[in-house]
Amino acid sequence: MSDRQLPVSELPADPEALLSALEGLEYPDTGVSPWVYVIALLVLVAAVAVVFALVSLWRRRRQRQTLLAWKPQADRELAALRGRVDQSEQGGDMLIEPGACAQRLSEASALARRIALVADSRSDVAPLSGGDWLRHLDRLTGSGSRFSAGTARALADAPYQRAPQFSRAQLHEIIDAIQAAANAHARRQSRSAALPS
């Protein structure tokens, strides 16, 4: 290796002279092939890509869990409501005793409202009543008119009646409609969480 060093002031201004000044220099031999550096860089890029992919998958899974955290609770409450309906006493004409019926309808209505609040903002859901409320639940379900035309239309006013008259089967239809709305919204949330962000 050459030990000659030129101060900056003594460097020639001509490019050809600069190149000729470099001719005498020797480069140290590291003994390492340049391909080792290329391979190391590729491994580093691949490792960063794998870490990025794993973090992205973890975040998406976490987002899906957070979005759907309400669903197990709703399922438990719907199952408990079904149990309470099954335990309600029936009269001679297979109708549930009016006091118990009013209580179950009130519970079903409150649960439907809470599920709707998960799906939409409070300002959109809170003022709804009557036919608007039922159409909103139909939209939440995403198909048909289970709420506005089926037995579940009772959610609009039956919880406020003094002595509603429904059978267990009719109350189960109402609960099934609420379950369908919850399931439909959970599917929509699941699909939206699966989309790349």
Image (tube, rainbow, N blue to C red):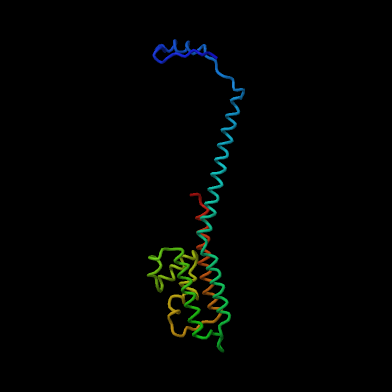
Q: In the image, residue 20 lies at what x, y percent?
A: 48, 10
**Residue at image coords 57%, 40%:** 47
User: In front here: 66 or 107?
Assistant: 66
In this rendering, the answer to whether 93 lies above or below 132 is: below
Viewer-proximal residue among 86 and 68: 68
* Relative image position of residue 189 (x, y in whole percent): 50, 59
Rendering coords of residue 155 (x, y %): 46, 75
Q: Which residue sits at x=53%, y=55%?
A: 62
Q: Nearer the viewer, residue 25 or 65?
A: 25
82 is higher (above) or lower (below) than 47? below
As drawn, the residue found furthest toward the bottom would be 92
- Total labels drawn: 0
Quadrant position of residue 95: bottom right
Q: Residue furthest front?
A: 3
Residue 118 location (% of width, % of height):
46, 64
Task: Name the image quarter holding the N terminus.
Answer: top right
